[in-house]
Image (cartoon, grey):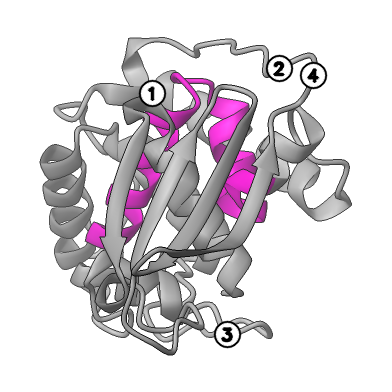
Amino acid sequence: MRRTILILAMAAAAAASGEQKFSAADVPHAGIRKPGKIVISNSGARITAYRFFGNIREALVSLRTSHRGLAYNPFGPSLFDSNAALHAPLPAYLSAAINDAAHAHGVDPRLLAAVAHHESGFNASAVSRVGAIGIMQLMPDTARFLGVNAFDARENIFGGARYLRTLLDTFHGDLDLTLAAYNAGPGAVQRYGGVPPYRETQGYVKNVRAAYEASLRH
């Protein structure tokens, strides 16, 4: 994942808490070549990531909030129902991993399964043309940031569940925005003030949402 996408993901996750500090060691592949802390500031109108070297400040990336802001449409409490029954016909080890990851991070295992199915068809060996890896199709830098081995099926699922929960919290339980951010990055959602006008992302949101809603009816 490009440096800007990774930093924007960090910025989106930090938005609710105002300002968070990170060290260069936390993001080893973000292009930070010298020691120095990263400070992410959120003014309400703009989220900016800075790198500091003593008294010298360098702006890494800045994201302006849409003038009209994001309109949130919370899907409902089912998104966070980590005890929901998973009925997908999966090998036992995958069902166990999805249920355990969902419980650990407070997300509906049916949502996690819907994302995993669309991302990789539950193929732990899947590698996309852009380098996304495994069941949850984590980019290598994202996996490193999450502290998981993307080629390990169970760790990949746990990493995807953690990232999904972060996005659900960032976008206040809005399922469409969460799915769009999982596919295109939270920066793209902020930049366009909603689901980005990318054909792939719009199809992704529609299809994963439909699969999830179908699982709720079983």
Query: Along the polypeptide, which appears first: circle 2 or circle 1?
Result: 2
Given contact means CB atoms under 8 Å apart, are the residues at marks 1 and 3 in contact? Answer: no
Q: Secondary structure at mark 1?
A: loop
Between residue 189 and residue 98, name the one nearer to us. Answer: 189
Q: Quadrant of the N terminus?
A: bottom right
Q: Is residue 138 left or right of residue 60?
A: left
Callout 3 crowding tier (Cα within 10 Å): few <14, some 14–19, many ≥20: few
Q: Nearer the viewer, mark 2 or mark 3?
A: 2
Residue 70 included in the magenta stretch of the image: no
Residue 170 included in the magenta stretch of the image: yes
Between residue 217 and residue 136, name the one nearer to us. Answer: 136
Query: Along the polypeptide, which appears first: circle 2 or circle 3?
Result: 2
Q: Which residues are magenta?
A: 158-187
Q: Quadrant of the C terminus?
A: top left
Residue 161: image location, x then y, percent: 30, 49
What predominant SS class does the magenta segment belong to? helix
